[in-house]
Image: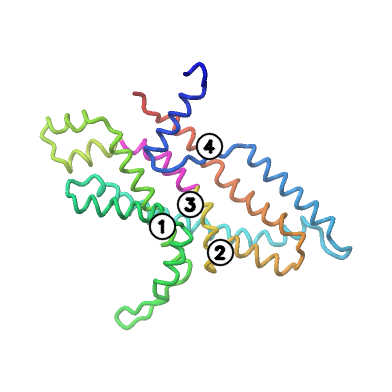
Amino acid sequence: MPVLLPAAERLLRSAMRERASGARALQLTPAHGAALLVAFVLGCGIAQAQARSYDPSILATIWKWTPLLARGFAFNLAISFIAMAIGTVAGFFLGFAQISLFPAVKRGAWFTMHFFRNAPWLVLLFYCMFLLPFQVTVFGVTIPIPDWTKATLGLALPVMANVSEIVRGAIQSIPTTQWEAAASLAFNRRQTQWMIIFPQCIKRMLPPWMNLYAILTMSTVLASIVGVNEMMTLTQRALSAENRPGLLLAFYSYVLLWFFVYCYPIARWTVRLEARYAVRQ
């Protein structure tokens, strides 16, 4: 079979990594960046051909709106940082709950993980936007809850579910001999998990965790649908202000380039970490 399918072993290793991490690997290549650059240049050419004689050039128009779009992109990154932090902390405990010896805890964690992992991210965003209150009152003080906070929580929920699978897969990938050796040294279960098993899991969890962060960063544009002033929302406002339909492809290609330039190094670093920390059986 390896003679007939030279890539079979490589594909098997990739499938096993994705199964253990609980997330699909993000595979960005320079060809994707080249395609985005071609789309951007093509969009600029089309827009310039449709421009009127008194309209400013396409590049000048994009440059004029770049500071505003940069602030929106920074907001995207802030949402991704906070959602990833919340989801990582919650998913860490949920992952350990999935391997609990108590059936009720284990079943509850399993149900929670599957519910939020298989629910569409946009649906979770709408649930958080409309079910959470717009303000809360604590000791007579009214504290407003902005939309971006609820959107961040909505994105943190699927991250929590995926991180829990990363944690569970990493723990269960540790050979059972490690548990047996710890038991022979009179370690209890909590000591075994925190002092022996979990330190070995960090290297295994890091690549899929970074891959999940890159996916989350690209998914923050969903917040534009619920009215958060991130990069996609500001791009739509810039297009409305310019009132030039020909700018559509150029502006959205420009936004895609921003996300590619940020996510591509993360994707390449993830690949390098996977090769460096690959488990040799």
Main secondary structure along the magenta-highlighted residues: helix
Residue 274, percent across and down?
44, 33
Q: Which residue is mark 3?
A: 216
Q: Which structural element holds mark 1? A: helix
The residue shown at (25%, 54%) is: 108
Of callouts 3 and 1, which one flags the residue occurring earlier in the amino acid sequence? 1
Q: Which residue is mark 4?
A: 268
Single out the residue that lies furthest toward the top. Answer: 3
| In magenta segment, residue 272 | no
The residue shown at (44%, 28%) is: 12
- Tag 1: amino acid: Ala
Q: Which residue is mark 1?
A: 156
Q: Which residues are the magenta region?
A: 201-214
- Tag 2: amino acid: Ser
Of callouts 2 and 1, which one flags the residue occurring earlier in the amino acid sequence? 1
State how far apart marks 2 and 4 are (Cα): 28 Å
Of callouts 3 and 4, which one flags the residue occurring earlier in the amino acid sequence? 3
Q: Is residue 51 above or below residue 264?
A: below
